[in-house]
Amino acid sequence: MNILCLGDDNVEGLLGNSFKIFRRYTRHPELLIDQTITKVCTSPFFTLFLNDSGQLFMVENFKLRPINSGEYLRDVVCGNSFYATLNTKGEVKVYGLKYLGSTSESMNYSALEEATTFEEFENEAVTQIGCNNKCIYFLTETGNLYEKKSIRNRVVRRVQESETTTSGLSKVQIEEKVERIFVGEDSIFVITQDKKLMAWGSNDGGLLGNSLSEQYSSPRVINIPIQTDEIKEIKSSELTTVILSKKQVLYEAGRLLNSSYYSTKVNFSICRQFQNQKVLAVGCKARSIMVFTERKELWCISTMHQLMETLCKKSIGSLFLIQTNMQAKTDQIYMNKFGHTFLLISREGLSKDFLQLFQSGEFSDFEVSKIKCHKQMIQFRTGQDPETVKKYLEDNFNYDEIYSFFFWLYGGQSPKLHYIVKIAENLGFTLKDKIFNHDIAKLLKDEESKDFTLKVIEENYDDEEDEFEEEIPVHKLILLARSGLFREMFKNINEKETNSVKDYSGKTVESIEKLIEFFYLDTFTLTADDDPQLIVEELQDAIDYYQLKNSSNLKFLLGSIKAQFSNK
């Protein structure tokens, strides 16, 4: 699992366990133990987890259950008592739509089983969805933006709109086509195709970056100190709006980061509270901002001083240091109004290693449109003969489209997902069945395809001339992708000896087996017979010895194991 959770309130078991007080930092809550989570949504009544297989899970009334089948979902968003899903075909479904805009403390869970679709999108795929508790927004592939507003709360805003359709959808009237949307609690920001940032909704305290403390009923251009192409994400709450750039610089407008709570910072400017550290992830909700920095420090800016003072390690005014030395990078921060912050821990070590191998072109044994690649990788990921895949790709796609396919093949993601969906359909597989981490994990037990042997040498300390040799079958491609030491070794090895190599690292066989397991799974498991302290010590040394470049996941795992046996 790759979730850390901060928070106290576990009303109705929405965190998936029976404890009223949820532990402050938990690496293994008992809900999604072997899942890699890509998105978290929370409401007062349920929590949604989207995993890297496009599978959605719901936790409500202390119970976890999968809530979709046969669909690969790209995204999910939720309000207080409803949620919406988007699949890879651009199809949208909304569950519990009648609760849009509801502030009621009671709801009928059976309503969440009822899916609403919109015929307006039959001929136009949706590429992005977003919502707050009052509106749902749908961005289509042609750059049109639609909204579904709450019947209960028409005071949210009155954007000039074309005729409302029979399903209650309205097309937002913006002169330019829209590329991206960022939906906050009471406002929405959009980036247009001509690279403008526009916004509307509540501007209380200068949230939208200007001095007019009013409600905007139509989109207005917002001036920011960076180009829109540099924006990674925008998050907005009732007191503040933050912009995180791709260069990992944080900008803010509003009242939360200002020295005086009641004053207004009306222009977006750089946040300098973090000692000029780069910001890796940010979350924003209600009267709090959560920030994760390059030093692996978790900071909170909040007006709830009494609560934060009980959790923090130190504070500077309204700035609170919550946690340090997490030993892993946080990719996303999701917050809600009910005291929870979910941190998604990076699980990119595996895919980054394979992407770097692909981009280097080293040790390739195949080419498609002059793109260097590996036959084994094509076989592992598509289940097809490499020559068949090569002919289909070269006959139907250009260089950029084929490169995007290999980017997905080696990394699990691609900026041109619609091409990947088309290629997958023609090659006879679906994306939900071809998740990168899962495909690589399957290879661990695929003994027939293992083409290499690692011979671990252990000295017999009773007889210095005696050596013990243990053979561990492995895929050569795995060693090439994961270890700089093995890449250097294979550059100098004789072709006749490429089916095996001896390991003189001095590590025990048990530790090397755990390392190989980590190479495939990005994690490993301990048994009752293992010595956790010895394994942690040896694998900590192995990080440098085997030249593991993307080792944050292993460091995080070893740190967690060390903490467990230290507390016994």
Image (cartoon, helix red, strand yellow):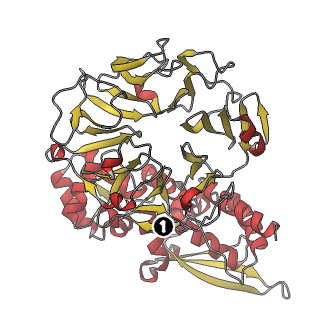
The quadrant of the picture occupied by the N terminus is: bottom right
Residue toward you, 448 or 250: 250
Q: Is residue 49 left or right of residue 325?
A: left
Q: Where is residue 344 in the image (x, y as percent from the top left)?
A: 55, 51
Residue toward you, 52 or 253: 253
Above or below, comparing residue 395 to residue 120 in the picture? below
Q: Position of residue 387 (x, y in %)?
A: 24, 66
Image quarter of residue 504: bottom right
Image quarter of residue 27: bottom right
Total labels: the figure holds: 1
The quadrant of the picture occupied by the C terminus is: bottom right
| Residue in the picture at 67% in, 37% down | 300
Above or below, comparing residue 553 to residue 228 in the picture? below
Q: Which residue lies furthest to the right in this view?
A: 462
Above or below, comparing residue 346 to residue 214 in the picture? below
Above or below, comparing residue 64 to residue 216 in the picture? below
Q: How crowded is mark 1: few (under 14 residues within 10 Å), some or many (20 or more)?
A: many
Q: Position of residue 433 (x, y in %)?
A: 33, 67
Q: In this view, does 75 lie to the left or right of 226?
A: left
Q: Where is residue 203 in the image (x, y as percent from the top left)?
A: 46, 20
Q: Is residue 242 visible?
A: yes
Residue that numbered label 1 is attached to:
64
Residue toward you, 204 or 70: 204
| Residue in the picture at 54% in, 60% down | 12
Q: Is residue 370 visible?
A: no
Residue toward you, 557 or 272: 272
Under tag 1, what secondary structure? strand
Q: What residue type is labelled 1?
A: Leu
